[in-house]
Image (tube, helix red, strand yellow):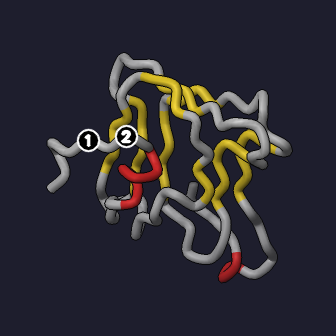
Amino acid sequence: NFDLVSFRTISKGASVLTPGDILYVRAGIYAESLRNAIPSGSSWSAPVTVAAYSGETVTLRPGAGVDRVLHFDGAKTQFIVVGGFILDGVKVGYDVVKITYSDSKDNHADHI
């Protein structure tokens, strides 16, 4: 149970999540890009959720040289909920959010 645990980065907090868990992120500006940093849930009944703490402003603002703010890529990247963030892509090279798609269901992210 991680109810009383705090981490310095969203990536670290997300790394301990399992299906059905929720990570609430406290107010601040986080200089992070989250590329496949959030583990998959197992269904919509047990997604993995990463969200801003109620009533608080959370900004993801990665530094220069990063391709994306959020990137979901690859097989079995699924059932993930992200909510309440400001995604600042002013310094990113390509997209603010990318959900990789492929004709092969076994090779793309889905249910994000």
Residue found farthest to the right = 94
Number of numbered discs present?
A: 2
5 versus 38 height, above or below: above
Q: Is residue 38 toward the left or the right of residue 15 in the image?
A: right
Q: Residue at x 58, y 33 (%)?
A: 60
Name the residue rendered at 73%, 51% in the picture.
98
> What's the amino acid at mark 1?
Ser
Q: Is residue 61 above or below residue 46?
A: above
Give the numbered dot on residue 6.
1
Residue 8's mark? 2
Q: Give, as a three-letter code, the residue at label 2.
A: Arg
Rendering coords of residue 30 (x, y %): 52, 32
Q: Residue at x 64, y 47 (%)?
A: 70
Q: Are marks 2 and 1 in contact (CB under 8 Å)?
A: yes
The x and y percentages for residue 13 are 36, 50
Please tell me how crowded label 2 is: few (under 14), some (14-19), or many (20+) other residues with Cα within 10 Å: few
* In-front residue for pair 11/55: 11
Q: Position of residue 64 (x, y in %)?
A: 76, 37
